[in-house]
Every structure is written in structure tokens, then in C-alpha cells.
């Protein structure tokens, strides 16, 4: 039963990752058919991000009232309905409306499952959980590409993934008795507690540091992925095809790195794994920045950044109960998710604005700055927590 439940959780995280890269794959066709500018994709992603921030902040209240299993099932149902709504949309306004339930569902399931795994499973399972998100994000462009080539259109792509989400929703609702058996009376008591207000969460010692670290991490990851091709083409003079291929390897590096880190996570511990990951990512950033005519260091550096980023996010989440207490973990993780979404939403566009004024050559140094900030904040947090309670790495 214990093993089967983690399989269901992994399936849910694959489902969470599936829609995340779809709009990027389909938008070149979608904006033409909908007769809107290319830039309008940003409006949809901003609406989705807004929904994820709101539902992440509400995750503590929802989970305490409904339980993790039901929150997950309802959230995946919301994303399934939203994706099917996308598939039947024939206007940009409808896409924006369906983006609201999509974002709300994605944020709630993300925070709920992260907290559940952090509480009930070891560090390796958290690494593999986020690895499976990468599997979903990597598979969906192939689904969309197949539908576009087979004349099913972008609507068919969204309909296919929406159908997968419907099946997953059915599995999650059928599995609800397993969630209740797994958590027993512990979560029943936990759910009976009053949800924490945001002001109370921010007053927990160390929370501002971990929020800053999450913000910095999401800035590094999202900036690296979004601007990699542009940097390689415009600043390094690499051809478009090679740049696109190596930019995609950054994400594959994250997925593969999380798979590998799962095998050593329990032995190394969250703190050590985070430190190794950040230092590895910083080395990769410096490889990108090396001012030489040979392009290999920059291309290899992107993969190294991906491998370095891999263990950081899941390990910070997994350490949340030990850092801030099991009774606070859902509230803290919800705020952490919101902080990460804010960084992902606003910081890559900020770099785009800076690049237009000071040059895209600052791409590696922008990531290096936030990488150092993340390392400093987490080291301060570790020292603070060590003084408060004995932490098992």
C-alpha cells in the first residue's frame, strides 16, 4: 500500500508537468489562428502564475480542511477541465478565462504533494518526485508536435493531455481510501488545527531566508532556460539549431540530475546535497562566462547548471519539516511555492529588460549573482536552525 501510493503521487506529478511546456510548443501556431500578437503568450502565463501563487498561499487552509488526497484529486480535476476548455477555445479571451482554474489547480496540487512527501517519505523520494515532473514537461511537447503534424491541431494536443488528466483524476479519487489509511489519526489531528495566517508564517524564525532562497533559485532556473538560446546565438554566435539543442539539454540535465540525486540523497542529506548542487551550478555559470572563442565551455556549462540545479529545489522542500516543524510545514511550503512562482514569473522578463539596455552578455553574471545570494541565505538559515534544534542532515 505504501509503495503503491508513492506511484500514484508520481503519476500526479507527471500530470502536473505535462501542461507546463505545452503553450510554448503550440503558441507559434496558436497566435496565428487566434489573430493575436506573439507577446500575448505572456498574458496567459501571467494569469496561470497568478493562480498558482494564490492557491499555494491557500494550500495550508485547504489541506487542513480537506486532506492531501482530496485536495490533489480536486486540483487535478480543475487542471483537466481547464485543458479541455483550452481545446475547445476559439478566442484569446476564452484561453485567458480557462487559464484561471488551470493556475489555481496547479498551485494547490504542487504545494500539497510536496508537503506530503516531505512529511512521509525520505529525501530520495522527493528527488524522484521532481524528476517525474520533468518527465511530464519533456513528454508534452512531443504530444503537441504529433497532434500538429497529424492535423489534429493545437486543440487536439490540449485535448489529448486533458484526457490523460481526466484518467489521472479518476485514479486519484479511487485512491482516496489509501490516503486516509496512510496518514491515520496524525493528519486528522493536524487538519483540525487552525490554518496559519500569512503574518504568522512570516514570523516563524528563518522563513524569510528560505523564501529569499526559493526566489533566487527560481530566478536562476527560469532565466537559464528562457534566455539560453538567445545568449548562445546573439552573444556567442552559435547557430540557431545548436543553441536550441543545448538549451533543451539544460532541462534534461535537471531531470536526469534529480533521478541520479535520488540514489545518494539519503546518504548525503538535504543540507549537503543543496550545497553541492549550488556550487555545481555556479561552476556551470562560470563556464558559460569564460571569454574564449571556443564554444564548448559555454555549451557544457549549460548542462552543468542543469545538473547543479537538480537537487536544490526538492532538497529545500524536503528539509522544511525539520527546519520549521511538521505542524508548520504545509503553511511554509505553500509560501515557498508562491515565492518560487513570483521569481519564475517576474525575474526572467526583468533580465530581458536589462539585456536590452546593457547587453545579453550579462546573462551568466545575472545567474551568478542570484546563485551566490541563494547560497548565502541558505547557509545563514542552516546556522540559525542549528542553534534552535538538532537537525538531521
Image: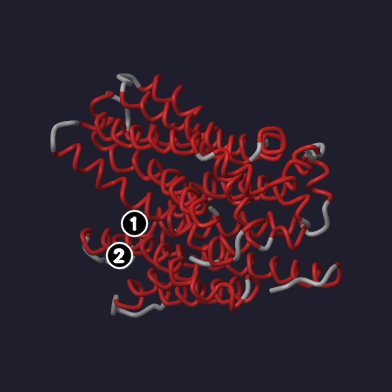
Residue 214 position, x and y percent, is: 62, 56
Q: In terms of depth relative to the viewer, which is nearer, 145 or 320? A: 320
Q: Which mark is residue 230?
A: 1
Judged left or right of residue 30, residue 120 is right
Q: Position of residue 217 (x, y in %)?
A: 57, 60
Q: CA distance from mark 1 to mark 2?
A: 12 Å
Q: Residue at x 13, y 36 (%)?
A: 150
Q: Residue at x 79, y 72 (%)?
A: 383
Query: Closer to the camera: disc 1 or disc 2?
Result: 2
Residue occupying the point 14% across, 32% down: 151
Which of the 4 image quadrants contains residue 45?
A: top left
Seen from this angle, which residue lies furthest left?
150
Q: Residue at 50% of width from left, 66% of height from top? A: 309
* Left or right of 303 in this view: 31: left
Which color scheme does this rendered protein use?
secondary structure
For residue 211, above or below residue 305: above
Q: Toward the viewer: 131 or 119?
A: 119
For disc 2, the marked residue is: 246
Q: Is residue 112 left or right of residue 246?
A: right
Q: Residues within 10 Å of mark 1 (few under 14, many from 20)?
A: some
The image quarter in which residue 275 lies: bottom right
Amino acid at each position: 500500500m505504501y509503495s503503491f501510493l508513492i506511484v500514484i503521487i508520481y503519476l500526479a506529478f507527471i500530470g502536473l508537468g505535462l501542461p507546463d511546456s505545452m503553450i510554448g510548443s503550440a503558441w507559434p501556431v496558436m497566435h496565428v489562428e487566434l489573430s493575436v500578437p506573439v507577446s500575448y503568450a505572456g498574458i496567459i502565463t501571467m494569469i496561470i502564475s497568478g493562480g498558482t501563487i494564490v492557491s499555494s498561499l491557500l494550500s495550508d487552509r485547504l489541506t487542513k480542511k480537506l486532506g492531501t488526497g482530496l485536495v490533489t484529486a480536486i486540483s487535478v480535476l480543475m487542471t483537466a477541465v481547464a485543458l479541455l476548455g483550452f481545446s475547445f477555445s476559439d478566442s484569446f479571451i476564452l484561453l485567458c478565462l480557462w487559464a484561471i482554474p488551470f493556475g489555481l489547480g496547479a498551485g494547490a496540487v504542487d504545494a500539497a504533494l510536496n508537503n506530503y512527501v516531505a512529511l512521509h517519505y525520505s529525501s530520495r523520494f522527493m528527488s524522484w518526485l521532481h524528476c517525474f515532473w520533468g518527465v511530464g514537461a519533456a513528454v508534452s511537447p512531443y504530444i503537441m508536435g504529433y497532434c500538429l503534424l497529424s492535423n489534429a491541431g493545437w486543440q487536439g494536443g490540449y485535448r489529448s493531455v486533458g484526457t490523460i488528466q481526466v484518467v489521472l483524476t479518476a485514479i486519484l479519487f479511487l485512491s482516496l481510501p489509501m490516503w486516509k489509511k496512510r496518514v491515520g489519526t496524525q493528519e486528522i489531528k493536524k487538519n483540525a488545527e487552525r490554518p496559519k495566517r500569512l503574518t504568522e508564517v512570516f514570523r516563524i524564525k528563518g522563513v524569510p531566508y528560505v523564501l529569499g532562497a526559493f526566489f533566487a533559485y527560481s530566478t536562476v532556473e527560469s532565466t537559464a532556460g528562457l534566455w539560453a538560446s538567445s545568449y548562445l546565438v546573439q552573444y556567442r554566435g552559435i547557430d540557431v539549431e545548436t543553441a536550441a539543442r543545448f538549451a533543451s539539454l539544460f532541462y534534461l540535465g535537471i531531470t536526469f540530475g534529480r533521478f541520479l540525486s535520488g540514489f545518494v540523497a539519503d546518504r548525503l542529506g538535504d543540507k549537503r546535497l543543496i550545497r553541492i548542487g549550488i556550487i555545481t551550478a555556479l561552476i556551470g555559470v562560470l563556464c558559460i562566462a569564460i571569454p574564449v572563442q571556443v564554444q564548448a565551455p559555454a555549451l557544457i556549462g549549460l548542462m552543468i547548471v542543469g545538473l547543479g540545479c537538480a537537487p536544490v529545489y526538492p532538497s529545500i522542500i524536503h528539509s522544511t519539516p525539520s527546519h520549521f516543524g511538521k505542524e508548520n510545514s504545509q503553511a511554509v511550503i505553500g509560501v515557498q511555492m508562491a515565492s518560487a512562482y513570483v521569481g519564475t514569473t517576474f525575474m526572467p522578463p526583468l533580465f530581458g529588460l536589462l539585456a536590452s539596455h546593457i547587453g545579453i552578455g550579462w546573462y551568466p553574471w545575472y545567474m551568478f549573482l542570484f546563485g551566490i545570494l541563494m547560497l548565502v541565505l541558505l547557509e545563514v538559515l542552516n546556522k540559525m536552525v542549528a542553534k534552535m534544534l538538532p537537525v538531521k542532515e
